[in-house]
Amino acid sequence: MVSFRFCFSPQALSLAGFLFLFKNFILRSMDTQLIIFDFDGVLRDASWTHLYEAYGKIIEAAGKDPSLFFADVGSFRKWYDVDWHKNEEKIFGGTYMPNTLFNKIFHANYDPNIKLFPWVPDTLSYLSNKHKLAILSSSTKESVEKELGELSQVFSFITGAEEVTKLKPDPEGVFLTLKETDTKPEEAIMIGDMNVDFMAGKNAGIKTGVVKWGLGDWEELLALGADFLFEQPEELLRL
C-alpha cells in the first residue's frame, strides 16, 4: 500500500526500508498509463441524504410506502447497495429488469443536488497531459456527461451503468475500459470512494486507489489494502 501522504513515521523505519517504500511509490506512479475514475464521490459530490430522498421518490412512483423499506437516512444506508440493480430487486421483487422510467425519476431528484467538485477541471486538465483518463460509473453515461459538459472531452472513454450487464464490483466495466483504451492491466489504476470500486479494480488485476472525500467509510477503505491512498484531492496530481 502506498499513501501519497506517507501515513507512517520515517523515524520508525530504517533508512533502507524508507527508501524501498519510496522507490516502490515512484515505480508504481511511473508505469500508470490509464487512470479510471469512479464518478460520484470522487469527481462529483455525493450525498446520503439526497440518495435517500431520490429512492423514496422511486418507491412512491412504484405505489409503495418508503417507510416499509427504510425509516431514515441511517436505516437507508444499511438497506442501500452500491449495485443499484439489487436495490430495485428489493423494491420490485424478482430479478432486475432495466426500467428507464425509474432511472429518470432517480436522476431528476438526485442530480440537481450534486455538482462537480470545484478542483476537478484543473486537476483533469493536468492529469490528461500525462495519462489517458476514463470514467467507470454506476450512474448513467447521460448523467455523467451532462455534469461534465465540455470536460467530457478529456476522457478517452466513459462507461455508464447502461453499457454493462453487471455493475461494480464485477470487473466487466474495467475490462471494457481497458479494451476500448488499448491498455494493459498493469498500466491502469482504478480510483474510487467505495469498496466496490476497489474490488472491481482488484478483480480485473489492475492497481487500485481509494479517496477519503467520498461516501465510503475511510477506516473500512484503509483495511482493503489499496495500492494508493488519497486523503486530499491535490494528491491526485502526483500520479
Image (spheres, helix red, strand yellow):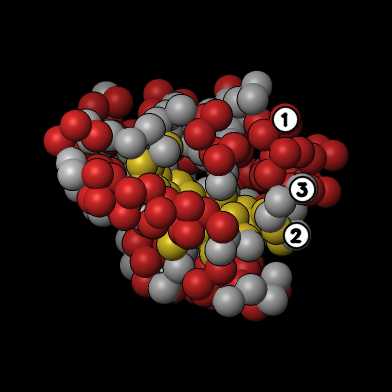
Residue 65: % across, % down:
33, 35
The numbered disc on residue 122 is: 1
Rendered view: 37 above or below 207: above
Rendered view: 219 above or below 180: above
Which residue position is annotated with label 2? 156
Secondary structure at badge 3 equals: loop
Quadrant of residue 208 in the image? bottom left
Quadrant of residue 100 in the image? bottom right
Which residue position is annotated with label 3? 129
Asked if disc 3 and disc 1 are in contact, CB closer than 8 Å, the reply is no
Residue neighbourhood size for the residue with mark 2, other residues' Cα within 10 Å, grouped as few (<14), some (14–19), many (≥20): some
Front residue of 158 and 20:
20
Identify the residue at horizontal 29%, vertical 26% (top origin).
Answer: 73
Sooner in the amino-acid sequence: mark 2 or mark 1: 1
Residue neighbourhood size for the residue with mark 1, other residues' Cα within 10 Å, grouped as few (<14), some (14–19), many (≥20): few
Front residue of 106 and 120:
120
Residue type beneath disc 1: Asp
Residue 149 in view of the camera? yes
Identify the residue at horizontal 50%, vertical 34% (top origin).
Answer: 235
Residue type beneath disc 2: Ser
Residue type beneath disc 3: Asn
Sooner in the amino-acid sequence: mark 3 or mark 2: 3
Rendered view: 150 above or below 203: above
Left or right: 67 in relation to 181: left
Q: Nearer the viewer, mark 2 or mark 1?
A: 1
Asked if disc 2 and disc 1 are in contact, CB closer than 8 Å, the reply is no
Secondary structure at badge 2 equals: loop
Residue 27: % across, % down:
48, 59
The residues tagged by marks 3 and 2 sit, at their Cα atoms, a distance apart of: 12 Å
Sooner in the amino-acid sequence: mark 3 or mark 1: 1
